[in-house]
Amino acid sequence: MSLHAAVVLLGAIVIGLIVGGLTFLSDFSTPGAALAGLGAAGISVPVLRSLIR
């Protein structure tokens, strides 16, 4: 795994954890927070890939 891929994936994990945590704190729904975090992490991968070059 290249350094670029590791940084992108680590950034996506951090973004997913933050979004999932904030979603959980807003409505106390674990499944909803998990889905929001996974969605945010998935969407952030292509964006981070294009931003981090």
Image: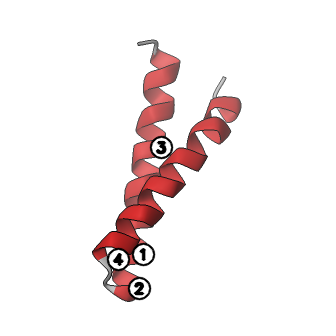
Q: CA distance from mark 4 to mark 2?
A: 5 Å
Residue position marked by numbered label 3 in the rendering: 12
Of residue 36 and residue 8, the one placed in the foreground of this image is 36
Q: Amino acid at mark 1?
A: Thr
Q: CA distance from mark 3 to mark 4?
A: 18 Å
Whether residue 36 is visible here, answered yes or no, is yes
Please say if the residues under marks 1 and 2 sit with CB atoms less than 8 Å apart.
yes
| Distance CA(mark 3)–CA(mark 2) | 21 Å
Image coordinates of residue 4 in percent, x first then y, are 52, 20
Report which residue position mark 4 lands on.
24
Q: Are marks 4 and 1 in contact (CB under 8 Å)?
A: yes
Let me know if residue 21 appears in the view. no
Residue 37 is situated, as x and y percent measured from the top left of the image, at 43, 59
The earlier-in-sequence mark between 3 and 2 is 3
Question: Which residue corresponds to mark 1?
Answer: 23
**Could you tell me which residue is drawn at 69 percent across and 34 percent down?**
51
Residue density around tag 3, few if under 14, some if 14–19, many if 20 or more, within 10 Å:
many
Please, what secondary structure does the residue beneath circle 2 have?
Answer: helix
